[in-house]
Amino acid sequence: SAIKRTALKLGMIPADGIGKEVLPAAQRVLEALGSSIPKTTFIPLQAGWEEFQRNGKALPEETIKILKEECDAAMFGSVSSPSHKVEGYSSPIVALRKHLDLYANVRPVSSVKIPNQSSYHQCDMVIVRENTECLYIKKEEIKTNSDGSKIALATRQITSTASSRIGKMAFEIALRRGKEREQAKSQGKSVWWNGQPKVTIVHKSNVLSITDGLFRESVRSVKESTNRYDSIKMEEQLVDSMVYRMFREPEIFDVAVAPNLYGDIISDGAAALVGSLGLVPSINAGDNFVMGEPVHGSAPDIEGQNIANPIASIRSAALLLSSLGYVEPASRINAAVDAVLEEGQYLTPDLGGKSSTTDVTEAILKRL
Ligand code: ATP
Ligand code: MG
């Protein structure tokens, strides 16, 4: 929500691998906004696999304490996971989501025309994934039948509380995107999605009528219980048909909201539509805190070479600002990124270019 602030404190957690290269790029871009955002202090914080190897903790208490007590929001880089199970190590990002009650993962996926690249479908959608329940509560058991065969069972939890709050977030995002598009149009910019803002509820309630039925009903009633969302169209897609249509005609989607597992799968699928993991941003959001995070991992294969694409991280910073209510500076960042991509002169190798992380960052700064 847009709280009036005179100053902003951002926790910066680069963590591992290319996170240490792309997060500073996002910081430079935020710094370049000058007085169009409140005076911003960046607080460097530790977490990750490298931190675990140094000090035995993947998420130091100090980091949680500072995030909770001092920071308005945070940016996260990327975390490496060891390829084998290591005693005492668990992912700091999962723990952070729990500690800060970041119940939604929000991923905008939008295509950009890059010169000399095979053209992808036009697409500009946001996937809003529930982040706390569904099959990911990890209640699994295995039993042996009397004939020696095995049966494995997993519990899937869907609650009306978690489903309504994720639904509300999806409708709020659709409202905000609608406003952003109107603003862009009034400035003479072209927008791909010209229709009414739309929320698509993704489920499989024809088969899982109780669990997905509750998800569907809870999200529907968010809209039906108020007139705040009257301007937003609500539709539904069964998850299998959602995947098919997303690949055939992604341009028909605006905001899609899904339970945890479906959301996980369709959001990686959607990232594939736009060409590189290095382009896709996300935020982890709750009612009281928000954390920007590029979708990609720590990319150990390209770490330390200054060739990682900083755009996912820079776009995550824009998304963070926009969710804090600073919509105009956020769209300035996005416009600078799009301009650099469309110009095609400064591209990192994942997009077929030869530029470095620093070159791309500086090209974006120049546009800003
Ligand atoms: P992790 O276990 O941390 O997820 P990973 O090996 O799965 O590591 P990812 O970061 O998920 O690596 O990346 C998958 C592939 O995409 C790698 O080949 C990586 O180099 C590439 N990639 C990911 N992010 C970027 C980026 N920002 N710029 C360029 N290439 C990237
Ligand atoms: Mg990975």
Image (tube, rainbow, N blue to C red):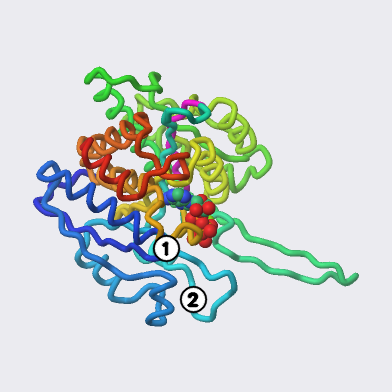
Locate residue 221 relative to residue 35 in the image: left or right.
Answer: right
- Bin the neighbour count of mark 1 within 10 Å (Cα to Cα): few under 14, some 14-19, many 20 and up: many
Q: Nearer the viewer, residue 109 or 14?
A: 14
Determine the image quadrant of residue 51: bottom left
Disc 1 C-beta below 8 A from ligand 1: yes
Q: Amino acid at mark 1?
A: Gly
Q: Which percent across, then down, holds residue 66?
A: 24, 69
Q: Residue at x 81, y 67 (%)?
A: 150
Q: Is residue 247 above or below residue 215?
A: above
Determine the image quadrant of residue 151: bottom right
- Magenta span of residues: 121-129
Locate residue 212 relative to residue 194 in the image: left or right.
Answer: right
Residue marked by disc 2: 89
Q: Main secondary structure of the magenta part?
A: strand
- Bin the neighbour count of mark 2 within 10 Å (Cα to Cα): few under 14, some 14-19, many 20 and up: some
Q: Nearer the viewer, residue 168 or 79?
A: 79
Q: Secondary structure at mark 2?
A: loop
Residue 295 seen in render: no
Does the magenta run of residues contain 350? no
Q: Are marks 1 and 2 in contact (CB under 8 Å)?
A: no
Q: Nearer the viewer, residue 29 or 61?
A: 29
Locate residue 7 relative to residue 282 in the image: left or right.
Answer: left
Q: Quadrant of the N terminus?
A: top left
Residue marked by disc 1: 17
Q: Residue at x 49, y 76 (%)?
A: 89
Q: Which percent across, then down, holds residue 90?
A: 48, 72
